[in-house]
Image (tube, rainbow, N blue to C red):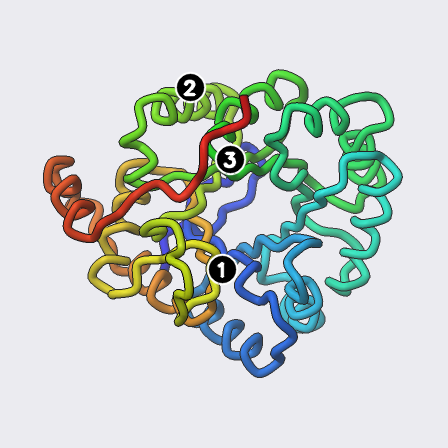
Amino acid sequence: MIERAPFGATGQESSRTIFGGAALWIDDVAKADRTLDVLLQHEVNHIDTAASYGESERMVGRWMGRHRDRFFLATKTGERTYEKAKDEFHRSLERLRVDHVDLLQMHCLIDPDEWSQAMAAGGALDALVEAREAGLTRFLGVTGHGLNAPTMHRKSLERFPFDSILVPYNAPLMRLPDYAASFEALIGLCRERDVAVQTIKAIARRPKPEGAEGYTTWYEPLMAQEDIDRAVSWVLLRRPGVFLNTAGDVDLLPRVLDAAARYDPEAALPEEEMDEWMESREMSPIFPAPFE
Protein backbone atom coordinates (compact mmCIF):
# COMPACT_ATOMS: atom_id res chain seq x y z
CA MET A 1 0.00 0.00 0.00
CA ILE A 2 1.19 3.51 -0.77
CA GLU A 3 1.80 5.74 2.23
CA ARG A 4 -0.87 8.34 3.02
CA ALA A 5 -0.53 11.83 4.47
CA PRO A 6 -2.78 14.76 5.42
CA PHE A 7 -3.66 16.81 2.36
CA GLY A 8 -2.91 20.16 3.93
CA ALA A 9 -5.62 21.37 6.28
CA THR A 10 -8.48 19.75 4.35
CA GLY A 11 -8.92 16.77 6.67
CA GLN A 12 -8.31 14.44 3.72
CA GLU A 13 -5.71 11.65 4.04
CA SER A 14 -4.47 11.16 0.47
CA SER A 15 -2.14 8.58 -0.98
CA ARG A 16 1.18 10.37 -1.37
CA THR A 17 1.14 9.32 -5.01
CA ILE A 18 -1.82 10.95 -6.77
CA PHE A 19 -3.13 9.74 -10.12
CA GLY A 20 -2.39 12.31 -12.82
CA GLY A 21 -5.42 12.18 -15.11
CA ALA A 22 -3.55 13.50 -18.16
CA ALA A 23 -2.62 9.86 -18.77
CA LEU A 24 -6.22 9.27 -19.93
CA TRP A 25 -6.06 11.83 -22.72
CA ILE A 26 -7.54 9.61 -25.44
CA ASP A 27 -10.92 7.88 -25.64
CA ASP A 28 -9.82 4.34 -24.80
CA VAL A 29 -12.27 2.59 -22.49
CA ALA A 30 -10.25 -0.60 -22.20
CA LYS A 31 -7.14 1.33 -21.20
CA ALA A 32 -9.12 3.38 -18.71
CA ASP A 33 -10.53 0.25 -17.10
CA ARG A 34 -7.06 -1.25 -16.77
CA THR A 35 -5.91 2.01 -15.20
CA LEU A 36 -8.70 1.83 -12.62
CA ASP A 37 -7.64 -1.70 -11.73
CA VAL A 38 -4.08 -0.47 -11.13
CA LEU A 39 -5.29 2.39 -8.91
CA LEU A 40 -7.50 0.10 -6.85
CA GLN A 41 -4.72 -2.46 -6.52
CA HIS A 42 -2.39 0.17 -5.05
CA GLU A 43 -5.18 1.84 -3.05
CA VAL A 44 -4.62 5.23 -4.64
CA ASN A 45 -7.44 7.40 -3.35
CA HIS A 46 -6.85 10.74 -5.08
CA ILE A 47 -7.41 11.63 -8.76
CA ASP A 48 -6.24 14.86 -10.39
CA THR A 49 -7.69 15.65 -13.82
CA ALA A 50 -8.53 18.78 -15.83
CA ALA A 51 -10.98 20.10 -18.38
CA SER A 52 -8.14 20.39 -20.90
CA TYR A 53 -6.94 16.77 -20.58
CA GLY A 54 -8.65 15.48 -23.68
CA GLU A 55 -11.06 12.67 -22.79
CA SER A 56 -9.73 12.28 -19.23
CA GLU A 57 -12.76 13.66 -17.40
CA ARG A 58 -15.09 11.41 -19.40
CA MET A 59 -12.92 8.36 -18.72
CA VAL A 60 -12.77 9.14 -15.00
CA GLY A 61 -16.51 9.83 -15.02
CA ARG A 62 -17.14 6.24 -16.05
CA TRP A 63 -15.72 5.14 -12.69
CA MET A 64 -17.64 7.52 -10.48
CA GLY A 65 -20.96 5.64 -10.36
CA ARG A 66 -19.29 2.71 -8.57
CA HIS A 67 -16.27 4.31 -6.95
CA ARG A 68 -17.02 7.96 -6.11
CA ASP A 69 -16.59 7.32 -2.38
CA ARG A 70 -13.10 5.83 -2.94
CA PHE A 71 -11.54 8.92 -4.46
CA PHE A 72 -10.77 12.48 -3.53
CA LEU A 73 -11.61 14.02 -6.92
CA ALA A 74 -9.86 17.10 -8.28
CA THR A 75 -10.20 18.92 -11.59
CA LYS A 76 -9.01 22.21 -13.06
CA THR A 77 -10.16 25.08 -15.23
CA GLY A 78 -7.79 26.93 -17.51
CA GLU A 79 -10.20 29.79 -18.15
CA ARG A 80 -9.39 33.22 -16.69
CA THR A 81 -12.78 34.99 -16.62
CA TYR A 82 -15.73 34.34 -14.33
CA GLU A 83 -18.20 33.32 -17.04
CA LYS A 84 -15.85 31.04 -18.96
CA ALA A 85 -14.45 29.39 -15.83
CA LYS A 86 -17.96 28.80 -14.49
CA ASP A 87 -19.15 27.31 -17.78
CA GLU A 88 -16.08 25.09 -18.11
CA PHE A 89 -16.43 23.79 -14.56
CA HIS A 90 -20.09 22.90 -15.06
CA ARG A 91 -19.12 20.96 -18.18
CA SER A 92 -16.51 19.19 -16.08
CA LEU A 93 -19.17 18.13 -13.58
CA GLU A 94 -21.21 16.68 -16.45
CA ARG A 95 -18.25 14.80 -17.90
CA LEU A 96 -17.24 13.50 -14.49
CA ARG A 97 -20.85 12.47 -13.77
CA VAL A 98 -20.79 13.98 -10.28
CA ASP A 99 -22.64 16.75 -8.48
CA HIS A 100 -19.46 18.08 -6.88
CA VAL A 101 -15.70 17.64 -6.82
CA ASP A 102 -13.44 17.78 -3.80
CA LEU A 103 -10.89 20.20 -5.24
CA LEU A 104 -11.24 22.78 -8.02
CA GLN A 105 -8.02 24.37 -9.23
CA MET A 106 -6.98 27.18 -11.52
CA HIS A 107 -4.84 25.46 -14.14
CA CYS A 108 -1.29 26.58 -14.97
CA LEU A 109 -1.64 30.10 -13.60
CA ILE A 110 1.89 31.37 -14.25
CA ASP A 111 1.59 34.12 -16.88
CA PRO A 112 1.47 37.50 -15.06
CA ASP A 113 -1.18 38.97 -17.36
CA GLU A 114 -3.40 35.90 -17.02
CA TRP A 115 -2.85 35.98 -13.26
CA SER A 116 -4.06 39.58 -13.08
CA GLN A 117 -7.14 38.75 -15.11
CA ALA A 118 -8.01 35.63 -13.11
CA MET A 119 -7.58 37.37 -9.75
CA ALA A 120 -9.43 40.59 -10.61
CA ALA A 121 -13.12 41.24 -10.08
CA GLY A 122 -14.98 39.22 -12.69
CA GLY A 123 -12.07 36.81 -12.98
CA ALA A 124 -11.88 33.04 -12.62
CA LEU A 125 -11.30 33.24 -8.88
CA ASP A 126 -14.82 34.59 -8.47
CA ALA A 127 -16.18 31.48 -10.21
CA LEU A 128 -14.15 29.18 -7.96
CA VAL A 129 -15.33 30.91 -4.79
CA GLU A 130 -18.94 30.82 -6.02
CA ALA A 131 -18.61 27.08 -6.75
CA ARG A 132 -17.37 26.45 -3.21
CA GLU A 133 -20.17 28.51 -1.69
CA ALA A 134 -22.69 26.51 -3.75
CA GLY A 135 -21.29 23.16 -2.56
CA LEU A 136 -19.95 22.24 -5.99
CA THR A 137 -16.43 21.92 -4.61
CA ARG A 138 -15.06 21.62 -1.12
CA PHE A 139 -11.60 23.12 -1.66
CA LEU A 140 -9.74 25.44 -4.04
CA GLY A 141 -6.22 25.26 -5.46
CA VAL A 142 -3.81 26.65 -8.02
CA THR A 143 -1.39 24.81 -10.29
CA GLY A 144 1.56 25.75 -12.46
CA HIS A 145 4.24 24.46 -14.82
CA GLY A 146 7.45 26.26 -15.63
CA LEU A 147 10.37 27.78 -13.79
CA ASN A 148 8.39 30.70 -12.42
CA ALA A 149 5.63 28.53 -10.94
CA PRO A 150 6.91 28.75 -7.33
CA THR A 151 7.14 32.55 -7.49
CA MET A 152 3.65 32.88 -8.99
CA HIS A 153 2.20 30.46 -6.43
CA ARG A 154 3.57 32.56 -3.59
CA LYS A 155 1.87 35.56 -5.18
CA SER A 156 -1.38 33.57 -5.44
CA LEU A 157 -1.23 32.51 -1.79
CA GLU A 158 -0.74 36.12 -0.75
CA ARG A 159 -3.82 37.04 -2.77
CA PHE A 160 -6.11 34.21 -1.61
CA PRO A 161 -5.99 31.35 0.96
CA PHE A 162 -5.87 28.43 -1.47
CA ASP A 163 -6.00 24.93 0.03
CA SER A 164 -3.42 23.41 -2.33
CA ILE A 165 -0.76 24.15 -4.91
CA LEU A 166 0.84 22.02 -7.61
CA VAL A 167 4.42 22.68 -8.71
CA PRO A 168 7.26 20.98 -10.62
CA TYR A 169 9.84 19.21 -8.47
CA ASN A 170 12.64 16.86 -9.41
CA ALA A 171 16.39 16.57 -8.92
CA PRO A 172 17.47 18.35 -12.16
CA LEU A 173 15.25 21.35 -11.40
CA MET A 174 16.63 21.66 -7.89
CA ARG A 175 20.14 22.00 -9.36
CA LEU A 176 19.04 25.39 -10.73
CA PRO A 177 19.87 27.86 -7.92
CA ASP A 178 17.11 30.37 -8.69
CA TYR A 179 14.48 27.67 -8.99
CA ALA A 180 15.64 25.94 -5.81
CA ALA A 181 15.48 29.21 -3.87
CA SER A 182 11.96 30.07 -5.08
CA PHE A 183 10.79 26.51 -4.44
CA GLU A 184 12.11 26.56 -0.87
CA ALA A 185 10.38 29.90 -0.24
CA LEU A 186 7.10 28.44 -1.52
CA ILE A 187 7.44 25.30 0.61
CA GLY A 188 8.09 27.41 3.66
CA LEU A 189 4.94 29.45 3.08
CA CYS A 190 2.86 26.32 2.46
CA ARG A 191 4.18 24.73 5.64
CA GLU A 192 3.37 27.88 7.60
CA ARG A 193 -0.21 27.97 6.27
CA ASP A 194 -0.79 24.19 6.06
CA VAL A 195 -1.34 24.29 2.30
CA ALA A 196 -1.16 20.93 0.51
CA VAL A 197 1.80 20.62 -1.89
CA GLN A 198 1.46 18.47 -5.01
CA THR A 199 4.54 17.92 -7.17
CA ILE A 200 4.84 16.99 -10.84
CA LYS A 201 7.54 15.82 -13.28
CA ALA A 202 9.23 13.45 -10.80
CA ILE A 203 10.36 11.08 -13.56
CA ALA A 204 11.17 13.67 -16.23
CA ARG A 205 14.53 12.88 -17.78
CA ARG A 206 15.03 15.69 -20.31
CA PRO A 207 13.23 17.60 -23.11
CA LYS A 208 11.64 15.30 -25.68
CA PRO A 209 14.02 14.49 -28.54
CA GLU A 210 12.65 15.05 -32.03
CA GLY A 211 10.86 11.96 -33.33
CA ALA A 212 10.93 10.16 -29.96
CA GLU A 213 8.32 7.43 -29.52
CA GLY A 214 7.24 4.94 -26.89
CA TYR A 215 5.58 7.25 -24.36
CA THR A 216 2.84 9.90 -24.29
CA THR A 217 4.39 12.54 -22.05
CA TRP A 218 5.50 15.81 -23.71
CA TYR A 219 8.99 15.33 -22.25
CA GLU A 220 11.21 12.26 -22.24
CA PRO A 221 10.58 10.29 -19.04
CA LEU A 222 12.78 7.85 -17.22
CA MET A 223 11.72 4.38 -18.37
CA ALA A 224 13.68 1.74 -16.45
CA GLN A 225 12.18 0.63 -13.15
CA GLU A 226 15.47 1.19 -11.34
CA ASP A 227 15.59 4.82 -12.49
CA ILE A 228 11.93 5.43 -11.70
CA ASP A 229 12.51 3.94 -8.24
CA ARG A 230 15.28 6.41 -7.60
CA ALA A 231 13.41 9.45 -8.91
CA VAL A 232 10.22 8.64 -7.01
CA SER A 233 11.99 7.86 -3.75
CA TRP A 234 14.01 11.10 -4.06
CA VAL A 235 10.78 13.13 -4.05
CA LEU A 236 9.09 11.17 -1.26
CA LEU A 237 12.19 11.07 0.93
CA ARG A 238 13.32 14.64 0.46
CA ARG A 239 9.89 16.10 1.16
CA PRO A 240 7.90 14.16 3.77
CA GLY A 241 4.24 15.10 3.48
CA VAL A 242 4.32 16.36 -0.10
CA PHE A 243 2.49 14.53 -2.87
CA LEU A 244 3.77 13.14 -6.15
CA ASN A 245 1.38 13.31 -9.10
CA THR A 246 1.97 10.51 -11.60
CA ALA A 247 3.13 11.08 -15.18
CA GLY A 248 0.82 11.44 -18.19
CA ASP A 249 1.43 7.92 -19.48
CA VAL A 250 -0.71 4.95 -18.40
CA ASP A 251 1.99 2.44 -19.31
CA LEU A 252 4.40 4.10 -16.88
CA LEU A 253 1.77 4.33 -14.15
CA PRO A 254 2.30 0.82 -12.69
CA ARG A 255 6.05 1.44 -12.48
CA VAL A 256 5.59 4.73 -10.64
CA LEU A 257 3.06 3.26 -8.21
CA ASP A 258 5.25 0.24 -7.64
CA ALA A 259 8.17 2.52 -6.83
CA ALA A 260 6.02 4.53 -4.40
CA ALA A 261 4.79 1.38 -2.67
CA ARG A 262 8.30 -0.01 -2.20
CA TYR A 263 10.35 3.08 -1.37
CA ASP A 264 12.48 2.79 1.74
CA PRO A 265 12.34 5.86 4.04
CA GLU A 266 15.83 4.98 5.27
CA ALA A 267 17.45 4.61 1.85
CA ALA A 268 18.19 8.18 0.81
CA LEU A 269 21.17 8.53 -1.50
CA PRO A 270 23.81 11.18 -0.80
CA GLU A 271 23.32 14.13 -3.14
CA GLU A 272 26.70 13.57 -4.77
CA GLU A 273 25.51 10.12 -5.82
CA MET A 274 22.36 11.70 -7.21
CA ASP A 275 24.54 14.04 -9.25
CA GLU A 276 26.49 11.11 -10.68
CA TRP A 277 23.27 9.26 -11.48
CA MET A 278 21.73 12.27 -13.25
CA GLU A 279 24.87 12.73 -15.30
CA SER A 280 24.91 9.06 -16.28
CA ARG A 281 21.27 9.33 -17.41
CA GLU A 282 21.88 12.62 -19.26
CA MET A 283 19.13 14.33 -17.28
CA SER A 284 18.33 18.02 -17.60
CA PRO A 285 15.52 20.48 -16.73
CA ILE A 286 12.59 20.25 -19.15
CA PHE A 287 11.29 23.82 -18.93
CA PRO A 288 12.37 26.86 -20.95
CA ALA A 289 13.22 30.15 -19.29
CA PRO A 290 10.38 31.64 -17.21
CA PHE A 291 8.31 34.67 -18.06
CA GLU A 292 10.13 37.90 -17.33
Is tag 2's residue or tag 3's residue first in the polypeptide sequence?
A: 2
Considering the image in quadrants, where does the C terminus appear? top right
Q: Residue at x 59, y 59 (%)?
A: 71
| Residue 105 image offset from top left, x and y in percent | 66, 41
Identify the residue at the far bottom of this view: 30
Gap in angstroms between the C-alphas marked 3 and 1: 21 Å
The reply, left or right, for residue 111 in relation to residue 171 is right
In front of the other: label 1 or label 2?
Answer: 1
Query: Which residue is more in the foreground, 178 or 99?
Result: 178
Q: Residue at x 45, y 31 (%)?
A: 289
Q: Is residue 283 above or below residue 168?
A: below
Q: What's the CA distance linking mark 2 and mark 3?
A: 15 Å
Within 10 Å of disc 1 (Cα), the crowding (few <14, some 14-19, many 20+) is: many
Q: Position of residue 245 (x, y in %)?
A: 46, 50
Q: Which mark is residue 185?
A: 2
Depth check, front residue: 168 or 241: 168
Q: Give the labeled residue for mark 3.
A: 196
Q: Earlier in the sequence, mark 3 or mark 1?
A: 3
